[in-house]
Image (cartoon, rainbow, N blue to C red):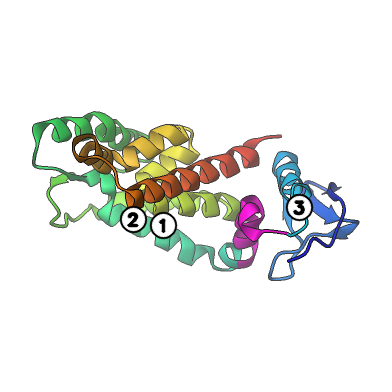
C-alpha cells in the first residue's frame, strides 16, 4: 500500500505508549489502539513506520505485527494460547535424543541437558528424556508446572513466547530465551543442533539455508520484542 503519512511519532497515555501517524493513532487490524507498556517498544514501532519508503511493506513491520497479534488475537483467548504453547512440553525437542552416533549423543547432552536442568530448577518441572522418536509420557505435575510458568506471561510476552516456542519446537528453549537464560544465537544453536551436525558431515542445500535463516530471524525477533518490553 502507498505510504499515506509523513511522520510516525510516539505518544504517552498514562502508563502506556502509542504511535501516531500524522497525529492519528495507529490502530491494530482489529481497530484497537496500538498501545504498549514500554516507551522503548513504542519508539521501535514508530521507527518501523518512519523507515518505510514510498510504499508500506507489512513484512518490514514485524514489531507492529506482534503487538497487533497480542492485542487482537492473544488477549481475547489467552487461555487457548497458553494451552497451545504448553502442548510443546509433551513432545519437547530437547527430550528426544539420538541413539547414534556417539558424537551427536554427546553434543545433545552437553547443550540440551543443562537447559532441562534449568527448567527443573526454575519451574520445578523435570522432563523425561528418551532416545529415538517413540513418544515418552511426561509427568502430569511437570506439565502443570510448565503451564503455570507460561501463564505467568502477559499477552505481549505470550506472543513472543509463542513465536520462539513454535520456531524452536521447544517450550524449554522458548522459556529460556525470554528469561535471558539463552541468547538468540544460543537458542538457534540448540534448536538447530541436529541439522547443524548433519550439515557438518554432508553440507547444506539451498532449502536448508533458507529455513535456517528464517529460524534465526524468528528467534531474534522474539528475543528483541521481549527485550524491548523489559526496557524502560
Residue 126 place in picture, x, y as percent: 26, 42
Q: Distance between the residues labelled 2 and 3?
A: 39 Å
- In this view, which residue lies farthest toward the bottom? 30
**Dot 3 lies on which element?**
loop
Q: Are marks 1 and 2 in contact (CB under 8 Å)?
A: yes
Residue 164 place in picture, x, y as percent: 45, 48
Which of the two discs, 2 and 3, sits closer to the camera? 3
> 88 and 104: which one is in front?
104
Residue found 47% across the figure and 54% down from its top: 162
Looking at the figure, which quarter contains the N terminus?
Answer: bottom right
Looking at the figure, which quarter contains the C terminus?
Answer: top right
Give the labeled residue for mark 3: 53
Residue found 40% across the figure and 37% down from its top: 187
The tag on residue 85 is 1
Which of the two discs, 1 and 3, sits closer to the camera? 3
The magenta stretch is: 56-72
**Dot 2 lies on which element?**
helix
Amino acid at each position: 500500500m502507498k505510504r499515506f503519512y509523513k511522520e510516525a511519532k510516539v505518544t504517552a497515555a498514562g502508563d502506556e505508549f502509542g504511535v501516531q501517524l500524522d497525529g492519528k493513532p495507529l490502530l491494530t487490524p482489529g481497530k484497537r489502539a496500538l498501545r504498549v507498556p514500554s516507551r522503548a517498544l513504542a519508539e521501535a514501532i514508530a521507527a518501523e513506520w518512519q523507515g518505510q519508503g514510498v510504499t508500506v511493506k507489512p513484512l518490514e513491520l514485524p514489531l507492529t505485527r506482534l503487538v497487533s497479534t497480542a492485542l487482537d488475537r492473544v488477549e481475547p483467548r489467552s487461555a487457548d494460547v497458553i494451552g497451545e504453547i504448553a502442548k510443546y512440553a509433551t513432545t519437547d525437542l530437547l527430550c528426544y535424543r539420538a541413539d547414534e552416533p556417539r558424537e551427536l549423543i554427546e553434543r545433545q547432552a552437553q547443550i540440551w541437558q543443562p537447559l532441562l536442568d534449568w527448567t527443573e530448577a526454575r519451574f520445578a518441572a523435570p522432563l523425561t528424556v528418551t532416545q529415538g522418536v517413540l513418544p515418552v509420557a511426561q509427568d502430569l505435575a511437570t506439565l502443570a508446572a510448565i503451564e503455570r510458568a507460561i501463564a505467568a506471561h502477559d499477552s505481549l510476552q505470550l506472543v513472543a513466547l509463542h513465536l520462539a516456542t513454535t520456531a524452536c519446537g521447544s517450550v524449554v528453549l522458548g522459556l529460556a530465551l525470554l528469561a535471558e537464560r539463552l541468547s538468540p544465537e544460543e537458542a538457534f544453536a540448540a534448536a538447530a543442533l541436529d541439522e547443524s551436525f548433519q550439515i557438518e558431515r554432508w553440507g547444506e542445500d539451498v532449502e536448508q539455508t533458507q529455513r535456517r535463516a528464517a529460524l534465526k530471524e524468528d528467534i531474534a525477533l522474539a528475543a528483541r520484542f521481549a527485550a524491548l518490553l523489559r526496557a524502560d
